[in-house]
Amino acid sequence: MRAINITVVESLIKAGAMDDFGVYRSQLLIKFEELYERYNRNNKSYKKGQRSFFDLVNKEEDFYNNKVKYPDIDEFSYDEALTMEKQYLGIYISGHPLDSYKEKIDKLTNYSCREIIEIKKKDNLAFAGIIVNVKEHITKRNNRMAFITVEDWSAGIDVVVFPELYTKTSEYINNDELVIVTGSQTEDSFIARGIIPLASRYLKVDINVNNNNKLLKLKKMISGKDGKMPVVFQFNNKIIFTETQYWIYSNKELEQRIKELMGNRQISYI
């Protein structure tokens, strides 16, 4: 009881070390303090001479044979469980926060963090990950910028977010936020050009070199909307992310106009 105190038991539950009991972690966290204290009282009574050895043995048998009534509550969400594992172990065990977005990531990005690290210098890069560290910085001109670390399954990348972009995106530059980062890799660091919530619904427009006139009309149609739905173009199997000024709001009338202009087959959502 001295080695395994109540804080250790809580940590073991949150890390998933007691999952083999076949009980939700959420349920174990409700009952473990009660069980721990009851068992601890038995030991203290024995040490004070209030019970004989045989009393303690019988009491232990009663303790282990007594069926625990756990509260009827839901388990932690998948993301909550992963967050606890990361907090107590430093790694994810049950999975990774990006797992449920793998198909989306494959469609919207072209590199993993590991691959970008190995690139010495290149532009027009896009990768997805979870923000694990944010360090805000005030420039000499008193503008806010940030240095963030973004991780995927393979590695982590340090990203520089300059003031103009940080002003537009600071609301979702937080620890544990899932994002797509676009930008360029220099010899020293990765410079972000865009940071977009991974969970966003993306409007994808397939384009070709023969519809420049349509593109100009589309640009005028979506320009200045500053909405929440990112607009991306697919050209020769490459994804091109637009600036936030071309993002749109979820609007059936506008989306229908875009379909009529570009054609139903050219429009999809990710």
Image (cartoon, grey):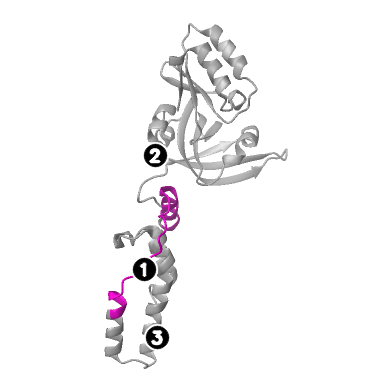
**Label 3: how many residues lie within 10 Å, few (<14), some (14-19) or many (20+)?**
few
| Disc 3 element | helix
Q: Quadrant of residue 48?
A: bottom left
The extreme right residue here reads 141
Answer above or below: position of 190 versus 221.
below
Q: Quadrant of the C terminus?
A: top left
State which mark lies toward you, 1 or 2: 1
Residue under label 2, please give it. Answer: 100
**Label 2: how many residues lie within 10 Å, few (<14), some (14-19) or many (20+)?**
few
Q: Earlier in the sequence, mark 1 or mark 3?
A: 3
User: Looking at the picture, how far across and down is residue 182, in whole percent?
Assistant: 51, 30
Q: Distance between the residues labelled 1 and 3?
A: 25 Å
Point 30% across, 86% down: residue: 56
Q: What stretch is highlighted in magenta?
A: 62-88
State which mark lies toward you, 1 or 3: 1
* Residue 221 is one of the magenta-drawn residues: no
